[in-house]
Amino acid sequence: MENHNNGILLESGTNELEIILFELGNEYYAINVLKTREIITPVAITSIPMAPNFVEGVIHLRGEIIPVINLAEIVSKQPSVNPDSDRFIIAEMNQVKIAFRVHKVNRINRISWEQIEKPSDLATGNQPYATGIIKLTDETLAVFLDIEKIISEINPELAGNVDSIQTLGERKRSDKKIVIAEDSAVLRELLKDTLKKSGYSNVTFFHNGKEAWDYLEKLAEDLSVHPEESVQLILTDIEMPQMDGHHLTHRIKHHHRLSGIPVIIFSSLITDDLYHKGEKVGASAQVSKPQLVNLVQEIDTYIL
């Protein structure tokens, strides 16, 4: 069994991350180290009747039953030519673990979010699960996979349900403005519906932290208006191309005209270590995806 140390906590607000680089066929892919727990050699799989083609079955790992997903099947790549030499990457999101079969694990790389381009900026081909394209060298690119999207499609309950907001009862309408940085189209739509149902319809979305920062910085340059009068709250994911949520929060909280605006981090990456990192960069609150009711309650606290 192979283990990797994912306990390395990068300095807060440096806009860096560590990725696990792996191969499917002859192409490179990557996922965030923070979403993985370990890497193991293949173990015995128990098949599941009537399971989708990409679900190989389940494994028993230290007292837990974990489904095995053939990642090559998900991204439409050829099967492994030597399954015995494959690796299982054990990933975790919202306390749910999944084993992803990959053909080869290369190494852990430390990169900047600035090295990750939005999929629309480069030709991605048939890669609906690409959250970004990483430029490793002038000749080598890697697809940064949207593991959240893959897992939420396997188990839609993990993505959250806007109907849960009904538990909050009747809501008042609010014209308070919320700025949101979220790279997932699925999450943007979910947040839009959730906030609208919660009474917040004055919402502006940005696809990553860099776009949100450019907007906020330009807003701060207008000395005729105080930024807190134009934006009452900022909501950000952590994992985004160009600029992550921690770096965005750090910049906001260290800007003399923006620091008073509350910033809520909404992410599936809020582990104990990452919670402390969010505190260090000055986040007003942190909510784990997909806890939509908790998110709305935190928003209420800061802008009602």
Image: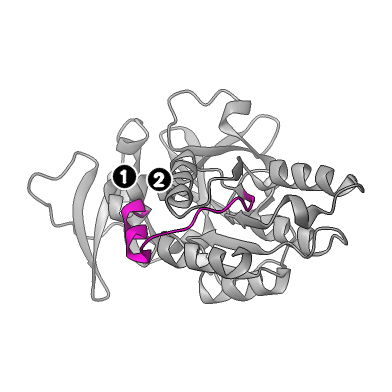
| Residue density around tag 1, few if under 14, some if 14–19, many if 20 or more, within 10 Å | few
Give residue 92's quadrant in the image.
bottom left
In the image, 159 versus 100, the foreground residue is 159
Return the residue at label 2: 149
> Disc 1 marks which amino acid?
Glu
Disc 1 vs disc 2: Cβ atoms closer than 8 Å? yes
Q: CA distance from mark 1 to mark 2?
A: 6 Å
- 149 up-or-down from 59: above or below: above
Q: Secondary structure at mark 1?
A: helix
Q: Which span is picked out in magenta? A: 160-179
Residue 209 locus on image (x, y percent): 67, 48
- 250 up-or-down from 82: above or below: below
> As drawn, which residue projects farthest toward the right?
223
Confirm whether the magenta stretch covers residue 164.
Answer: yes
Residue 222 locus on image (x, y percent): 89, 44
Residue 23 locus on image (x, y percent): 46, 41
Q: Quadrant of the C terminus?
A: bottom right
What residue appears at the point 83 percent right and 64 percent down from the top-left corner? 254
Direction from residue 202 to residue 66 in the image, left or right: left
Residue 283 locus on image (x, y percent): 66, 68
Does residue 71 show up? yes
| Residue density around tag 2, few if under 14, some if 14–19, many if 20 or more, within 10 Å | many
Does residue 80 show up? no
Return the residue at label 1: 153
Confirm whether the magenta stretch covers residue 4.
Answer: no
> Disc 2 marks which amino acid?
Lys
